[in-house]
């Protein structure tokens, strides 16, 4: 089982930047993808970005295209989400997730693809 801990959230001004980190521990050898999701009050949890663990292929939602960048450090079991040009709409709790279940055709933007979740880190964008 994989344990995930997010960090780096906080208060940031609109137009600013912040970098989130996710540290993975435990049985990480079966993990094939890491993803970031977010959830605002009263809203459903939505996909933000994902990265394949071995090849490093990246995936982004249309809402954050061109502003966010996901990356990983395999040796340190870390995944990052660099968020630039932040908007008020980006305010949410950001969750890190790991995918390790055997799925014939895994979809990186689907919640059910991911097995383990972190506790989340709050990002608040102010005007």
Image (cartoon, grey):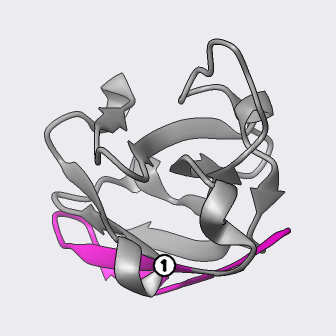
Percent position of residue 112, x then y: 79, 30
* Residue 112 falls inside the magenta stretch: no
Q: Give the percent coordinates (x, y) of residue 79.
A: 42, 70
Kindly indicate the quadrant of the structure image that contains residue 61: top left
Asked if residue 83 lies left or right of residue 15, the reply is right
Q: Residue furthest right?
A: 1
The stretch of residues the image draws in magenta is 1-23
- Please say whether residue 12 is one of the residues in the magenta stretch: yes
Quadrant (top left, top right, bottom left, bottom right) of the C terminus? bottom left
Residue 81, by quadrant, is: bottom left
User: Is residue 10 shown above or below 60?
Assistant: below
* Main SS, magenta residues: strand
Task: Say what secondary structure mark 1 lies in.
Answer: loop
Q: Is residue 119 above or below residue 5?
A: above
Left or right of residue 62: residue 122: right
Residue 10 in view (yes/no)? no
Between 43 and 32, the one lying in front of the other is: 32
């Amino acid at each position: 089982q994989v344990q995930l801990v997010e960090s780096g959230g906080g208060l940031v001004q609109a137009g600013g930047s912040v970098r989130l980190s996710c540290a993975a521990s435990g049985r990480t050898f079966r993990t094939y993808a890491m993803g970031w999701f977010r959830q605002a009050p009263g809203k459903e949890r939505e996909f933000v970005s994902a990265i394949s663990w071995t090849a490093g292929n990246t995936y982004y939602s249309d809402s954050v295209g061109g502003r966010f960048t996901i990356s990983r450090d395999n040796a340190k079991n870390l995944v990052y989400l660099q968020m630039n040009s932040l908007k008020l709409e980006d305010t949410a709790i950001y969750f890190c997730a790991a995918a390790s279940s055997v799925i014939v055709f895994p979809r990186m933007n689907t919640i059910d693809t991911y097995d383990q979740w972190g506790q989340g880190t709050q990002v608040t964008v102010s005007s």
